[in-house]
Image (tube, helix red, strand yellow):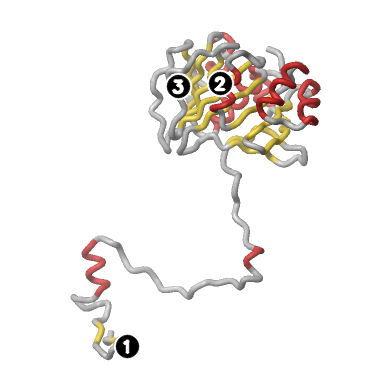
Amino acid sequence: MTATTTRTGAPEPSPGTPDSPGRRLLRAGFGLIGPRHARHSVSLEQLGALALPIGDDGVVIGVDAEGRPAVLGLNRPTPYDVVLIGGLWTAQVLALRAAATGARVAVETGRPQAWAQMVHAMGGGQNGLAVYEVGRVPPQGASAGTPVLVVRDCGMRPPRGRVASGPWQAVLTLLPYLSPVAPRLLRQARLVGVQRISPDESAELGRALALPRADVDALPTLADGFTLWCADRDRQYVMTQPTDAEIGLLGTPRRMD
């Protein structure tokens, strides 16, 4: 291989010589020099045609009003708190689907018998789901490789949890109804899901979340399986459709437990 000449006229060592830049990079541990390819570029007029798949990574929680999959990204590098004012059925479907994506699920509950069938179906707690008494959830050691979802099913007045949300560890708090502790939980939540509630609760929640009048009127009439998800100023109605396996394990959608 012959030597080339730089713009200044000084000879440049060929890549195969002992003092070439390529040799020095190899000795420094930067790996082999790959093949050279032509640059790819698009014109300004073509730029609008480019699209990236954004928002398709997470748990499919149902379909939106247009029938498109609604996806909830629970596995995040930052703390993520979710409050669901609704039924146990929806919380259990979310836990099942989170476990199916590879997350470990830790359930803190005062009614372990309500979760026993799920634990049994998933291998006795050895395959991604474990149930703990209220206040007894140990540190989970969440990481990017082993994300964790903590489900707090602790009734109307859940105590402050020992295990909080953190990097790669989301916390879902289930409230059967709008309780006195709801305002505190709503303030710290990044996402709020609301199922069918009474007109008085809907009016109170509408003030807390600054909901439009149409949503306040709709919440007392929601059918089983429907949830209004609210994040900042974004709102989306989602219908959770169970699979055959979920129906066999949990039954059909229901608001009341």
Q: Please name the residue shown 53% across and 28% down the image.
A: 81
Q: Is residue 136 above or below residue 167?
A: above
SS state under label 1: loop
Q: Which residue is labeled 2 in the image?
A: 184
> Residue 37, position in %: x, y?
45, 73
Task: Locate the C terminus and report the quarter of the image it occupies.
Answer: top right
Task: Locate the N terminus and report the quarter of the image it occupies.
Answer: bottom left
Residue type of the residue flagged with mark 2: Arg
Q: Which residue is labeled 3 in the image?
A: 126
Q: Residues within 10 Å of mark 2 (few under 14, many from 20)?
A: few
Calculate the distance from the C-alpha at mark 3 to the C-alpha at mark 2: 34 Å
Residue type of the residue flagged with mark 1: Arg
Q: Residues within 10 Å of mark 1 (few under 14, many from 20)?
A: few
Count of numbered badges drawn on the protein: 3
SS state under label 3: loop
First reached walking from the N terminus: tag 3 or tag 2:
3
Calculate the distance from the C-alpha at mark 3 to the C-alpha at mark 1: 66 Å
Question: Could you tell me if the residues under marks 3 and 2 are in contact, i.e. CB atoms within 8 Å?
Answer: no
First reached walking from the N terminus: tag 3 or tag 1:
1
Numbered disc in front, either 3 or 1: 1
> Residue 80, position in %: x, y?
51, 32
Q: Residues within 10 Å of mark 3 (few under 14, many from 20)?
A: few
Question: Could you tell me if the residues under marks 2 and 1 are in contact, i.e. CB atoms within 8 Å?
Answer: no
Q: Please name the residue shown 80% across and 31% down the image.
A: 214
> Residue 126, position in %: x, y?
45, 21
Instruction: Give the side of residue 30 with respect to residue 124, left or right.
Output: left
Q: Which residue is labeled 1 in the image?
A: 7
